[in-house]
Image (tube, rainbow, N blue to C red):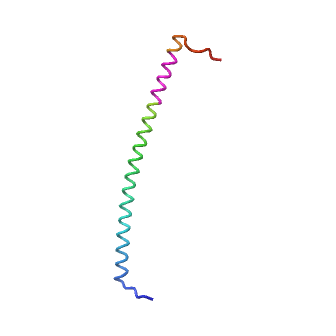
Amino acid sequence: MAEVSNGLIYEVLKKVQEQVTRVQTGVHGIREELSAIRGHMNAVQRDIHVTYDWFDGLDRRMDRIEQRLELTDARS
């Protein structure tokens, strides 16, 4: 069996520590990107909600106009 010295173990542990540091940095970057994506998704969801509200208002106005002009079909 090959002899393992403390120096060799120390060098291997230094490399492992560098790799772990790189992984942590990458994970931090990914978290920032996910946070940005979450913010964009929330903004899109708000825009869709506002659009639905706007169309609902138009629909109600259209119903009132049709009733005033007596354009509605007889509904059963």
In this rendering, the answer to whether 27 lies above or below 1 is: above
From the viewer's perspective, tell me whether residue 60 is left or right of residue 25: right
Residue 2 image position (x, y, % from top left): 42, 88
In this rendering, the answer to whether 36 lies above or below 52 is: below
**What is the magenta range?**
52-64
Q: How many marks?
A: 0
The residue lying at 39 percent from left, 44 percent from top is 39
Quarter of the image for the N terminus: give it. bottom left
The residue lying at 34 percent from left, 74 percent from top is 14
The residue lying at 36 percent from left, 56 percent from top is 29
* Residue 55 belongs to the span the image colors magenta: yes
The residue lying at 51 percent from left, 16 percent from top is 64
Quarter of the image for the C terminus: give it. top right
Q: Is the stretch drawn in magenta largely helix, strand or loop?
A: helix
Q: Quadrant of residue 41?
A: top left
In this rendering, the answer to whether 23 lies above or below 61 is: below
From the viewer's perspective, tell me whether residue 68 is left or right of residue 44: right
Residue 4 image position (x, y, % from top left): 39, 85
* Residue 39 belongs to the span the image colors magenta: no
Of 42 and 1, the residue lying toward us = 1
Residue 68 image position (x, y, % from top left): 51, 11
